[in-house]
Image (tube, grey):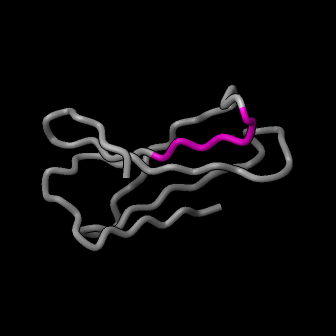
């Protein structure tokens, strides 16, 4: 699956975008994926569900890392 992330007001200090993905309730299968910037305010990443070995629903969050190293939940 391709996850497209678009920010209406992307702060200029965003250095990276990470996408944690998990299927199990205890998050024991969580994987942090790095998104690629496509253009200002637009990022994307690809989730390969074969990596999870679990059928069903998946949870996807989005975090950004600012230029000063601080990580923020989006």
Image-based side of 3 in relation to 40, left or right: right
Q: Left or right of 12: which side holds 34?
A: right
Q: Residue furthest front?
A: 25
Name the spot of residue 7 as percent of width and height, x first: 32, 68
Q: Is residue 21 magenta?
A: yes
Quick check: 18 left or right of 33? left
Residue pictured at 33% horizontal, 59% vertical = 37
Picture quarter containing residue 51?
Answer: top right
Q: Residue furthest bottom?
A: 8
From the top left corner, tell me how far across and down residue 14 is, in percent.
21, 51
Q: Nearer the viewer, residue 34 or 62?
A: 62
Residue 9 drawn above or below residue 30: below
In the figure, 39 relative to 64: above or below? below
- The picture quadrant where one finds residue 27 is top right
x 83%, y 38%: residue: 53
**Residue visible at 48% across and 67% down?**
4
Along the line of sight, the residue nearer the viewer: 31 or 27:
27
42 versus 24 height, above or below:
below
Which portion, as a residue range, is magenta?
A: 19-25
Residue furthest toward the right? 55
Is 38 colored magenta in this rendering? no
Q: Position of residue 12 (x, y in %)?
A: 13, 58
Look at 23% across and 64% down and name the residue there: 10
- Horizontal relation, residue 4 to residue 42: left or right: right
Count up the numbered dots.
0
Where the N terminus falls, by quadrant? bottom right
């Amino acid at each position: 699956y391709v996850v497209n992330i678009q920010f209406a007001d992307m702060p200029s200090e965003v250095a990276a975008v990470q996408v944690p993905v998990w299927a199990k309730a205890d998050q024991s299968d969580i994987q942090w994926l790095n998104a690629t910037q496509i253009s200002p305010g637009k990022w994307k990443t690809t989730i390969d569900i074969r990596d999870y070995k679990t059928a069903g629903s998946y949870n996807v969050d989005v975090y950004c890392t600012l230029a000063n190293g601080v990580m923020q939940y989006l």
